[in-house]
Image (cartoon, rainbow, N blue to C red):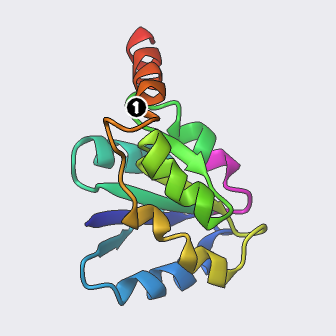
Amino acid sequence: MKIAIGADGAGKPLLDVTASHLSGKPDLTVADLSEPGLYADVSQKILDGEYERAMLFCGTGIGPSISRNKVLGIRAALTHDTYSAERAAKSNNAQIIAMSARVIGPELAKAIDAFLASSFDPDGPSAENVKAIDRLDRAR
């Protein structure tokens, strides 16, 4: 799987820990896209198929979540635990998760890669909810 990661100044230490952890996984290619404008660029790269998913880090995780959800076709989730990270993918078909460096610590950030191991089931119990989200995108 090819994933993008990125952070602002507040999230950079947590990104570094997570990037080091992910670099040991042979089935992942990880690109650090930390730079000004990251929040806009990563969404388009996912829509273009350059990356399958992204993990973004900042002080609260709120900014990346809000800004990414403004891009048609992107679903981003603020995650602070492994369950919400997993469900972001499984229940909501999210391509991006955002994490708060001021809320979670390094060990939990490493465990949140459960997001990368989870996939959406288009025939599962949440399929209708995701279709409703897609309809909202089309109506914009």
9 shown above or below 122: below
Q: Amino acid at mark 1?
A: Ala
61 shown above or below 107: above
Percent across and percent down for residue 32 are 40, 70
**The magenta stretch spans residue 61:** yes
Split into 4 quadrants, where in the image is the C terminus? top left
Q: Is residue 6 left or right of residue 84?
A: left
Q: Which residue is mark 1?
A: 127
Q: Is residue 17 visible?
A: yes
Q: Is residue 71 left or right of residue 23?
A: right
Please report the residue visible at 31 percent of the width from the left and 35 percent of the height from the top.
123
Percent across and percent down for residue 46 are 31, 47
Q: As rendered, which of 86 and 31 lies closer to the eye?
A: 86
Q: As rendered, which of 11 and 104 lies closer to the eye?
A: 104
64 shown above or below 70: below
Please report the residue visible at 44 percent of the width from the left and 51 percent of the height from the top.
89
Percent across and percent down for residue 16 are 54, 82
Split into 4 quadrants, where in the image is the N terminus? bottom left
Q: Is residue 34 visible?
A: no
Which type of secondary structure does the marked residue at label 1 adopt?
Answer: helix
To which quarter of the image does residue 81 belong? bottom right
**The magenta stretch spans residue 89:** no
Please report the residue visible at 47 percent of the width from the left and 16 percent of the height from the top.
136
Residues in magenta, as a range: 58-64
Percent across and percent down for residue 20 are 46, 87
Please report the residue visible at 41 percent of the width from the left and 16 percent of the height from the top.
135
